Image (cartoon, rainbow, N blue to C red):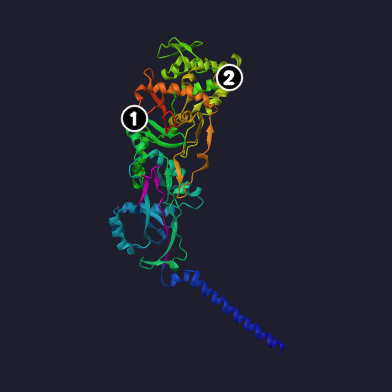
C-alpha cells in the first residue's frame, strides 16, 4: 500500500515538473527570446545605432565655434543582401556599378554580419527617394547621424578635426568604436573626445520579409537612449581670434594671447591656417592631402609647434634672473661701444649708446648691456665654476616655462630647446664657458621657444611672478567644470620687487621716443612690450613682439 502511495506522488511530481519546464520554456520564448517570434513571422531583427550629437564648442562669450548638422548614411549588412535590382539602387544613390562592387567588397572586409557604411552623407533628396523604395533592397538601411559644422571657419588648429576611426582606434577603444564612427584627431576635438562624443544608443528594429520596418522589438524594452555629448566653453574670444587671423593673412607665423590672471588663451592663431569645414565628411581625404602638400605647412600648429629663437624678447627674463641673483640692480650701468667682445667672439649692437642702465637697455634693446649681464651671471661663482653656474641659470629659465611643455589642453605641444650643462659637455667637452654660449644673452644660440611659451613669459611678468597653465577650455558641460591643473599657480622664483624695474623698461620700449616698439603704441592704453629680431639661415629674419596691457591689472599678454 505504501509503495502504491509513493508511486502516485512520484508520478504527480514528474508531471508537475514537466509542466513547469514547458511553462518556463513558453515564457522564455514569448518574453526573452526573439528566435521563435522572428521565425514564426518571417521577421528580421536589426540592431540600429543612434548616434548622439557631438557636444558643441562655444567661445568665451557663448558664440558658436563648432556645432552639428544631420546627415544620412546608407548602411549594409552584407550577409542579408539578397537578389536586388543593383542598377536601380545605383541610380537612386548616384553611383556606378563599379562603385557598388567596390563598396560591397569594402563592407564585407569590415563585417559580413554587422551594419557597415556603404554610402555616406546622402543628400536630403536622395534620402527621401531611397526611403520610399528601401523595402526593395534587403540588407540595406539608412542611419542618421550628425557631422561637424564650423559656422565662421575660425580657429581650425585650436578646434582640430574629427575623422573616421581606423582599426587602431577601434582596438584601443575596447569595443566602444565601430566602423564608420568618428573620433577627434587633433585640437580640443581630440583632447576632450570622451566628453564631446556622448553615448551611443541602440534600437532593436524588426523588419518583415519585404524589408519594411515593423517597429521596435518588444516595444523598445531592450533599446537604449543616446546621450548627447557635453558642450565645451572655450577661452577663445571670437573677436580677437578673427582679428588675429585677418592680421596674419598671407603671412607665416603665429599669434597667442593669454589672460594673465586665469591662463585662459584668448587667441590661438596659426598661419597659414585651414578651413575646418574642409576637414569634414567626404571632403576630408582631398583636403588632408592638400594640407600636407602645401610647402607653407598649414598643418603645423605654430602656437605650440613653431620653434623660434626668442631673440631680444628674451632680455626681460634675463634681467629678472640677474636682479634675483644680485649681479645687477636697477641702476647698474655698462658702457656700449657698439659691440661686446667675449673672448674672440664679437656680438654686435645696433646702437652706440654710451653708458646704459637697465631701463634704457631694455627699451633700446642694447645687446652689449645684456651680454654684460649674462657674463656676470655665469661667472658669479668664479671662472672655474662657470659650467655648474650655467646649470643653475638654465634651471631658473625653465621656471618660466622655457625648454619644457607647458601642458596646454591640446595634443602635440613641443617643448622647445634649452641646453643643459650635459648637452654642452657633449658638444665641447669641459672646455666651454660664458664666451662659448654668449649668444644666449640675446635669446639666440641653443635656445628656441614656441609662441605659447613667449606669451606665457609675458603672463608671468604681467602677474609679477607666476602663471596659471595656459588652457583653451574654461568650462565643461552644464556644471561648468574645469580641470584642476588649469587653476593652480606656478611661481617663477623671482621676488615681486624685481619686476617693476623691468616693466619700466618694457613700458618705455613701447611708449618712449627711444623705444624699439614705439610704432606699437596705442593711445589711451599703457602697454608694456619688447621686440625681437632673429636671423634665419633658411629665409627672412624672424620678427617677434611680446607684451601685455595695461601695465596695472593686465587683461592680456601676447606674443
Q: Which residue shows up at 51% across the image and 51% down it?
A: 174
Residue 89, image quadrant: bottom left
* Mark nearer the N terminus (1 vs 2): 1
In the rendered image, residue 35, in percent from the top left (x then y), is placed at 47, 69
Magenta residues (range): 44-69
The quarter of the rendered structure image containing the C terminus is: top left
Return the residue nearer the eye: 459 or 140: 459
**Tag of residue 102:** none
Per the image, is 453 magenta?
A: no
Q: Which residue shows up at 45% across the image and 24% down it?
A: 503
Can residue 186 be seen?
A: no
Disc 2 designates what residue? 387
Per the image, is 56 magenta?
A: yes
For label 1, count other residues whose C-alpha is less than 10 Å away and answer few (under 14), some (14-19) or many (20+). some
Q: Which residue shows up at 53% across the image and 35% down it?
A: 489
The quarter of the rendered structure image containing the N terminus is: bottom right
Residue 126, image quadrant: bottom left
Disc 1 designates what residue? 251
Can residue 106 be seen?
A: yes
Which residue appears farthest toward the bottom when viewing the image? 1
Position of residue 128 relative to residue 480, above or below, is below
In the rendered image, residue 297, in percent from the top left (x then y), is placed at 38, 33
| Element carrying mark 1 | loop
Amino acid at each position: 500500500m505504501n509503495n502504491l502511495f509513493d508511486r502516485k506522488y512520484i508520478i504527480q511530481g514528474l508531471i508537475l515538473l514537466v509542466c513547469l519546464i514547458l511553462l518556463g520554456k513558453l515564457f522564455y520564448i514569448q518574453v526573452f527570446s526573439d528566435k521563435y517570434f522572428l521565425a514564426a513571422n518571417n521577421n528580421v531583427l536589426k540592431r540600429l545605432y543612434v548616434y548622439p550629437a557631438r557636444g558643441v564648442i562655444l567661445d568665451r562669450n557663448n558664440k558658436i565655434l563648432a556645432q552639428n548638422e544631420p546627415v544620412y548614411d546608407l548602411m549594409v549588412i552584407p550577409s542579408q543582401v539578397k537578389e536586388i535590382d543593383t542598377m536601380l539602387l545605383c541610380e537612386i544613390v548616384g553611383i556606378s556599378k563599379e562603385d557598388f562592387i567596390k563598396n560591397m567588397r569594402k563592407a564585407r572586409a569590415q563585417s559580413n554580419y554587422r551594419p557597415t557604411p556603404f554610402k555616406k552623407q546622402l543628400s536630403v533628396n536622395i534620402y527621401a527617394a531611397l526611403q520610399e523604395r528601401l523595402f526593395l533592397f534587403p540588407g540595406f538601411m539608412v542611419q542618421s547621424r550628425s557631422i561637424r559644422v564650423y559656422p565662421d571657419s575660425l580657429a581650425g588648429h585650436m578646434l582640430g578635426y574629427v575623422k573616421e576611426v581606423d582599426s587602431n582606434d577601434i582596438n584601443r577603444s575596447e569595443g566602444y568604436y565601430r566602423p564608420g564612427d568618428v573620433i577627434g584627431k587633433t585640437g580640443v576635438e581630440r583632447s576632450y573626445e570622451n566628453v564631446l562624443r556622448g553615448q551611443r544608443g541602440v534600437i532593436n528594429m524588426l523588419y518583415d520579409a519585404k524589408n519594411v520596418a515593423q517597429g521596435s522589438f518588444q516595444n523598445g524594452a531592450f533599446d537604449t537612449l543616446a546621450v548627447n555629448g557635453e558642450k565645451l566653453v572655450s577661452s577663445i574670444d571670437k573677436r580677437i581670434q578673427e582679428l588675429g587671423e585677418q592680421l596674419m593673412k598671407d603671412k607665416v607665423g603665429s599669434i597667442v594671447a593669454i589672460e594673465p590672471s586665469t591662463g585662459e588663451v584668448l587667441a590661438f592663431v596659426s598661419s597659414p591656417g585651414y578651413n575646418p569645414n574642409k576637414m569634414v565628411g567626404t571632403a576630408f581625404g582631398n583636403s588632408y592631402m592638400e594640407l600636407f602638400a602645401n610647402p607653407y605647412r598649414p598643418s603645423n600648429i605654430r602656437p605650440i609647434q613653431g620653434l623660434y629663437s626668442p631673440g631680444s624678447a628674451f632680455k626681460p627674463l634675463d634681467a629678472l634672473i640677474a636682479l634675483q641673483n644680485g649681479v645687477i640692480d636697477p641702476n647698474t650701468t655698462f658702457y656700449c661701444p657698439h659691440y661686446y667682445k667675449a673672448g674672440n667672439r664679437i656680438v654686435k649692437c645696433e646702437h652706440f649708446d654710451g653708458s646704459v642702465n637697465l631701463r634704457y637697455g631694455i627699451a633700446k634693446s642694447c645687446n652689449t648691456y645684456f651680454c654684460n649681464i649674462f657674463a656676470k651671471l655665469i661667472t658669479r661663482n668664479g671662472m672655474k665654476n662657470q659650467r655648474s653656474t650655467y646649470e643653475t641659470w638654465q634651471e631658473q629659465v625653465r621656471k618660466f616655462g622655457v625648454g619644457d611643455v607647458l601642458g596646454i589642453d591640446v595634443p602635440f605641444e613641443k617643448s622647445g630647446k634649452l641646453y643643459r650643462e650635459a648637452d654642452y659637455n657633449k658638444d665641447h667637452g669641459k672646455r666651454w664657458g660664458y664666451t662659448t654660449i654668449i649668444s644666449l644673452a640675446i635669446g639666440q644660440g641653443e635656445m628656441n621657444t614656441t609662441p605659447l611659451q613667449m606669451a606665457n613669459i609675458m603672463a608671468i611678468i604681467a602677474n609679477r611672478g607666476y602663471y596659471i597653465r595656459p588652457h583653451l577650455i574654461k568650462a565643461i558641460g552644464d556644471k561648468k567644470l574645469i580641470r584642476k591643473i588649469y587653476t593652480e599657480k606656478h611661481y617663477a622664483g623671482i621676488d615681486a620687487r624685481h619686476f617693476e624695474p623691468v616693466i619700466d623698461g618694457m613700458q618705455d620700449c613701447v611708449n618712449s621716443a627711444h623705444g624699439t616698439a614705439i610704432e606699437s603704441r596705442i593711445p589711451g592704453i599703457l602697454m608694456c612690450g619688447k621686440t625681437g629680431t632673429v636671423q634665419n639661415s633658411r629665409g627672412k629674419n624672424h620678427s617677434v613682439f611680446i607684451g601685455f596691457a595695461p601695465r596695472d591689472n593686465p587683461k592680456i599678454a601676447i606674443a
